Image (tube, rainbow, N blue to C red):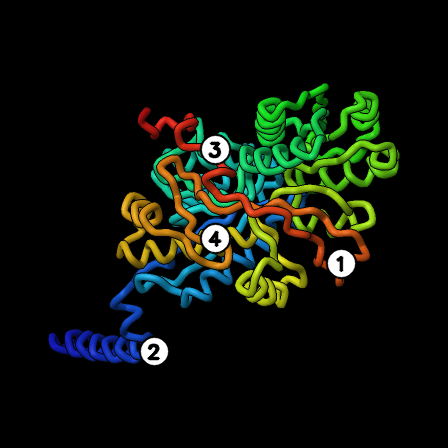
Amino acid sequence: MARFPGARSARFGAWTLASVAWVAVALAGFPGPALAQGKPPLKLGAILDMSGLYADITGPGSETAAKMAAEDFGGEVLGRKIEIVAADHLNKADLSANIARDMLDNQGVEAIVDVAASATALAASEIARARGKIIMFNGPGSIRLSNEACGPYTVHYVFDTFAQANVTGLAAVKQGLDTWFFLTADYAFGADLEKDTTSVVVKSGGKVLGSVRHPLNTSDFSSFLLQAQSSRAKVIGLANAGGDTINAIKQAAEFGLIKGGQKLSPLLAFITDIDSVGLPTAQGLLLAEAFYWDLNDDTRAFSRRFMERTKRVPTSAQAGVYSSVTHYLEAVKAAGTTDAAAVMKIMKETPINDFFARNGRIREDGRMVHDMYLFEVKTPAESRGRWDDYKLLATVAGEEAFQPLSASRCPLIKK
């Protein structure tokens, strides 16, 4: 058979033209702007307790709050779709550090939010600081996060052990409840809460008669409560949180400590804790909170939308997640970049005015300063229904509630 030199070229040319035509048709199915932009999503990582003793305080509710903030912002910023990536740290510090590392190194996460619990927050903070990334704490309370463990891109947003102790302890001693015994969770948060409350009680003229440490996630408080009872202290301070606080309050009632004249003071309690305990047992408790769903029209409006999704009111930590994510996104938009230094500069320069805070501000040490509230738990007769649990006793200005900057142990603060 004769071979024609041009045959192969002709076939190749025909194939090339067909291929070009096919590619052109295929590309027609993709929107031009998407190809032009090619921008990856802006990811925010939420490290949470999704299934343990802090799940009601943060958990799925914090993930929902973060997603609501992203949606309300418009779903994108700087031409990048906003995505919320959530993970469960199982209340393990090493796992929290690994999650933070994977989010920042492999998943393209730009900033981290919440990090429920103090030990897990301290672990994740180290990872974020080493990578120069912003991390905003909503669920953890240890004062160390804005003191020894502070960083240039660290924000402690909702509450801390100093403010909780200052608002609750001072009010109790002023009412004559001047002798204390502590039931303390045996980890960073519990130790800091006991230390800060002790300082407030002693400075106010009270005395601490003793304390006992209990393991995290304790189911049986009987031996600890017997020690507290035998101390004859007027106040049993619960330096714990979540399920531990709930169990301690319920078992204290069963042991008759409250009927015996001793007062229980949960040094960190949330609306979900009071709901779990029930008003008949919780009535009369004094507690400090950074937020309450029924404070004003703005808090009620947000809480109604939150309840539509979760069937429960938001805790202060969950409300703080929404507020902090919104504040971050607004700073990203204003800065025109996700560069941590540029974004944090705007976050610290810009006052926070929303349903969560009025004239809130982020200080040099990363502490977000805002008003705190002292509440008393209502009696069943005073409550109009589920979630109507608090009576407002006092509003404490942020400058009075939180540790003064002059006392800060943050290395960033020049003395």
Helix, strand or loop at label 3? It is loop
What is the quadrant of the C terminus in the image? top left
Q: Amino acid at mark 3?
A: Gln
State the mark number for residue 83: none
Residue sitting at the far left: 5
Q: Is residue 220 above or below residue 350?
A: above
Q: Earlier in the sequence, mark 1 or mark 4?
A: 4
Residue 91 picture quarter: top right
Q: Nearer the viewer, residue 278 or 23?
A: 278
Q: CA distance from mark 2 to mark 1?
A: 59 Å
Residue under label 2: 29
Q: Nearer the viewer, residue 106 or 143?
A: 143
Q: CA distance from mark 4 to mark 3?
A: 18 Å
Residue 313 x %, y %: 64, 59
Helix, strand or loop at label 4? It is loop
Q: Nearer the viewer, mark 2 or mark 1?
A: 1
Q: Amino acid at mark 2?
A: Gly
Q: Nearer the viewer, residue 300 or 337?
A: 300
Residue at 68%, 28% in the rendered image: 184
Residue under label 3: 403
Q: Earlier in the sequence, mark 4 or mark 3?
A: 4
Residue under label 1: 383
Residue at 54%, 54% in the rendered image: 319
Q: Nearer the viewer, mark 2 or mark 4?
A: 4
